[in-house]
Amino acid sequence: MERLTSLVILAIVAISSQSCLRDFDTPEEQDEQIRSYLSANNIDAQSDENGIYFYPINENPSGKDPSVLEVVGFYYNVTLLDGSEVARHQEADGPPVESFHEVGQLIPTGIDLGMRQMRVGETYGFVIPTRFAYPGLSIEGLIPLDAIILAEIEIVSALIDDVHETREINGIDQYILDQGLGEFEELPDGLRYLTIQAGVPGTESSNNQSIVVDYNGKLLDGELFDEQEDQVIILDENLLPTGLNTGLKKLLRDETAIIIVPSRLGFINSPLVIPQRLSNAPVQPFSVLVYEVTRNI
C-alpha cells in the first residue's frame, strides 16, 4: 500500500495548493458548532475518538461488517451544515462508487473513518469537522474555508478483492457481448485486446520506446474521460495505466485496436476523492477503462 499512501498524500497536497491557507477553527470550537447543529435539528448522535459524529438512518444489524481492504461499494450525499450540496451519487446516478475499506484511500478521510461504524445495507449520517473533511480548502460557491460537512452514506456491498475481481471480469465479458465487438485476445490479469485495423507486421514496440498515437478512453457506460491526437508516449515511464502500457507494446504501426483495462491495471491505486473534480486522476479507482488506439509512428 506504499504507492497508495503516496498517491493519497499527493492528492491532499494538490487539493491544498488550490486554496488560500489559514488556521481554521480549533477542534473545540468546531465540536461546539457541531453539537449546536445536532441540538437544533434534534439529532441524537454519538462521537468517535476523532470528533466525528455519527447516527443511524437505516440499520441492518445482520448485515456484513466490512473488513480492512475489502472493496466497499456505497452511495453518498455530502452537504454543508446549511444544506448546500457539495457532492452526491445516488442509485439513480449509476453503480455505487467503490474504495478499499479503512486504508486511507478515500477523501474526505472522515467518510472513510466513519464507515467503520457501518454494516452492509445500512445508511448513516456523519457530521465531520474540517480536519477530516477539506482542511485548508476553499472553492468559491462550493466549499468555504473551515467547512464542517454532513455526509449521508449507504453501504451496499463489501467484497474481498478476489471476488470483486471475478465480478469485474464477468462484467467486461458481458460488455463485449452486449457491444458485439468480436473475440478479444485474453491477456494476463484480465486485459482484453482486439485488433480493428491491421498494422505493419514486425513493428511491435520495445521497452522504453517512444510511439505516437491517437486514442480515446471511455468507461463501460460510454462516458469519455480522455482523448488525444498525435500523442507522444514513452513506454514504461509509469505515466500510463499498467494495462494500457502493456497493450500499447502489442500495437503495430498503423494498427487500430481496442484495449480493455480492468481496474487492477488501471487507476486502482489512486484515491477516491469526493467530489471527483478535486481528484488528479481522470476516473474513480475501480473504473474499467476502454481505449481505442491508433499507432501513427
Image (spheres, rainbow, N blue to C red):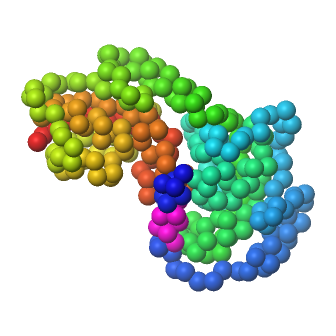
Q: Is residue 231 shown left or right of residue 222?
A: left
Between 92 and 227, which is closer to the camera in this rendering? 227
* Horizontal and vertical percent position of residue 150: 72, 59
Q: Is residue 125 shown left or right of residue 131?
A: right
Q: Residue at x 77, y 39 (%)?
A: 65
When asked about the image quadrant of residue 258, the answer is top left
* Horizontal and vertical percent position of residue 215: 25, 41
Q: Residue at x 49, y 69 (%)?
A: 13
Between 34 and 131, which is closer to the camera in this rendering? 131
- Tell me which segment is drawn in magenta: 8-16
In the rendered structure, does residue 154 fall within the stretch colored magenta?
no
Q: Is residue 150 shown left or right of residue 288?
A: right
* Horizontal and vertical percent position of residue 134: 61, 67
Considering the whole magenta stretch, tell me its main secondary structure: helix
Q: Count the marks: how many?
A: 0
Q: Is residue 237 shown left or right of residue 295?
A: right
Q: Residue at x 51, y 40 (%)?
A: 286
- Residue 229 can be seen in this image: no
* Horizontal and vertical percent position of residue 166: 54, 25
When asked about the image quadrant of residue 90, the answer is top right
Q: Residue at x 54, y 58 (%)?
A: 5
Between 67 and 152, which is closer to the camera in this rendering? 67
165 relative to 206, above or below? above
**Quarter of the image that includes the C terminus:** top left
- Residue 49 can be seen in this image: yes
The outermost residue toward the bottom is 22
